Amino acid sequence: MTGVQQPLRWAIVGTGGVSEYFVSDLNNVEGSVPVSIVSRDAVRGREFADRYRVASAYEFEDALNDESVDVIYIATPMATHHRMAAAALNAGKHVVVEKPIAMNADEARELFAIARREDRFLTEAMWMMFNPTFHALQAAVDAGRIGQLRSIRASFGLPFPKDAGSRRDAILGGSALLDQGIYAVSLVRALMGDPERVHVSGHALAGVDLTHWITFEFSDGRFAQIAGSMQEYTDPSASINGTGGWISVDAPFWASAGLTLRSGDIASAFTQPVRTEQAADGFGYGPMIRAITNAINAGYRYCAEHSPNDTVAVIDLLDRMRAEILNPADRSQVAAGGK
């Protein structure tokens, strides 16, 4: 007789807004259950746990030693991701880390090496890669619905308050590229592959890159333009353009609920749009949590939707682009692959 699969038991590290959305959706995913909230502030941790019907609230070291915890989800300031993820993997836990998984590509590679050594699951919580609208976009492009893909435009700019937590704190890993630009870079790589050349411009203050506007060039004449800012609005939608039409992805493109495809001759493209919409699924983390749950239960050590190679390749690009913005005196064209 086959035994019943026990739910995966999660510890949620961090009590910010992202953790609230995540644990709310986790409560609605079959096969996974939050069992503890991790916070340095005991009172805040207990209040958070009570609000979301979670039994335990304690500090990080307690989660590492808690045999009732299978998976640790890390949603703390970006500069802490590598240290906490490494500790959790070494403690024998499966680990899910909010993006970016680490502050640079070397740290990311090290984490995946630890995961392989310890035979543990590890993934970056890049929810866009699991979004049904993103999958519909990929399918439309792969099916040739817009002919040959030629260009992409994607932006993510919002005027975050200057006291918005760790966003503007260099020590805590504040970075518009790592926090916002990562979505656009992931979108471009998923649809177009690695660029041959990257032209970088941006603005930094006190060790934090605040804005960026970047062009990716490909050897066959294709290109992509991305922009981001934590100081002003930059239309947070995306456009994917081809020889036979274009697709407009609703804002926010990284967690979109719909897209519009226009194709055919010019008259048809303007007058006969094809609309695709997805029903709301909680706060949008459900598809990713279900994929992670299924992958772990099947014995996989990462999700096919967001592989370690893709994770590291994106952070490697972000690394080199961020260096251009933080060191304007050394600014130059960035060649793909570190050439």
Image (cartoon, rainbow, N blue to C red):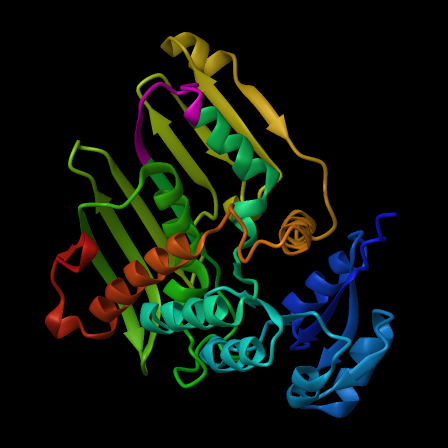
Task: Give the residue drawn at x 65%, y 74%.
Answer: 16
Quadrant that contains the C terminus:
bottom left
Q: Residue furthest front?
A: 1
Magenta region: 142-151
Q: Position of residue 151 (x, y in %)?
A: 30, 34
Q: Position of residue 254 (x, y in %)?
A: 52, 48
Choose top left, top right, bottom left or bottom right for residue 321. Answer: bottom left
Magenta-span inclusion, residue 148: yes
Choose top left, top right, bottom left or bottom right for residue 230. Answer: bottom left
Q: Position of residue 139 (x, y in %)?
A: 49, 28
45 lies above or below 181: below
Q: Total of numbered circles in the picture?
A: 0
In-front residue for pair 171/103 = 103
Q: Position of residue 37 (x, y in %)?
A: 74, 78
Report the predominant secondary structure element of the magenta stretch.
Answer: loop
In-front residue for pair 214/313 = 313
Magenta-span inclusion, residue 86: no
263 lies above or below 82: above
Task: Give the residue drawn at x 65%, y 89%.
Answer: 61
Q: Is residue 29 visible?
A: yes
Task: Give the residue drawn at x 42%, y 27%.
Answer: 141
Q: Is residue 101 visible?
A: no
